[in-house]
Structure formats: C-alpha cells, structure tokens
Image: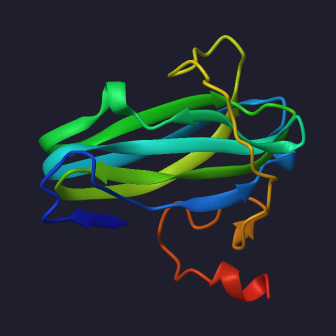
Amino acid sequence: MRLEARGNRRRSQWVASVQMVDATAYRGQRMRLRGYLRADDVDSGGLWVRVDGILEGMYAMLALDNSEDRRVEGTRDWDVRDIVVDIPPEGITILLGAMITGDGELWVDDLTFEPVADDVPLTTEPEVVVTDQPYERPLGVFPTPTNMDFEREMEDPMESDR
C-alpha cells in the first residue's frame, strides 16, 4: 500500500489508511500490529491503532497509538515497525492502518495483527477518552483483519453492510 500527502503546509494536516475490525475476538488480549514501512521525504509517518468501545453507555476511545514517539521521518528503506496495545473488554471496534502527518510518501507491506504475551511491553500507555456521544457502530467493519499483505483486490466492506 502507498500513502501520499502533498501540500500539507502544517504538521497538523494528515492522511491515513484505516481498516476497521470487530474487537470481539480480541477482547482481553494484548495485540501487536507489525509491518514493513518505507518512506520518501516524510515529515512524520507510521502505523496506528485505535480501540473504540462503550464506557458508561457512551462512545469512548479506549486506546490509541499513532507511533508519534517512534515516527518515521525523511527517506528510509524498508524497516519493521510495531504497535502493541491491549484490547479492553469494552472494545467494540479496532481501527488500524498507517498515516502521514505533513507531507511525503509512505509504503506499507506485510502487516500482521496477532496476540502477544502479556510481558511484551505496550508501545504507549492507554489514554481513555469518554465522550458525551452514544456509540454507533460504523459501516465497513470486517470480522477480522483482511488483506494485510495487500496482495488481493479488496472487497468493498460498505457493500456488505447494506
């Protein structure tokens, strides 16, 4: 997969890929997103994972790691990158992908999403954010991660939800 961002004059502008996965099968597990990244003139880039769910009857972001403290910058050859997060029992949807903040090109290949032992350290401490909005399951949620090696043409998940 290739992401490209051009004309983002501020580092607050970003582009991201996302795949949404049902969190049910992963609840209570420590999971690792691992993949190969290559960069060309990237301001800031990397993998990202977010876990959404329900706390106190409202939508909550239960975990977020956007690799900001381990970002890819500049031009780099292929390198393995990891994100390790816990999937809380309240998790409903896992969002995973890659992102660029600012400008550049980022290539991503051979992603895996797999359980790891509890002694594998988290890559960032979870920060829970509860909103004042009810949770609504988004369209396009896959039952498990799909086409993580980017070798197949993707089906449109929006079509299966209609």
- Residue 63 at what x, y percent from top left? 63, 33
Its colouring scheme is: rainbow
The quadrant of the image that shows the C terminus is bottom right
Is 70 placed above or below 53 here? above
Left or right relative to 112: residue 150: left
| Residue lying at 69% horizontally and 73% vertically, measured from the top left | 140
Give 155 or 149, whichever is nearer the viewer: 155
Is 70 placed above or below 3 here? above
Left or right relative to 66: residue 23: right
Is 23 placed above or below 114 here? below
Is 151 placed above or below 74 here? below
Residue pushed farthest front?
A: 132
- Residue 124 at what x, y percent from top left? 51, 21
| Residue lying at 81% horizontally and 53% vertically, measured from the top left | 134
Left or right relative to 99: residue 30: right
Give 122 or 102, whichever is nearer the viewer: 102
Give 88 or 54, whichever is nearer the viewer: 54
| Residue lying at 56% horizontally and 48% vertically, measured from the top left | 112
The quadrant of the image that shows the N terminus is bottom left
- Residue 143 at what x, y percent from top left? 79, 63
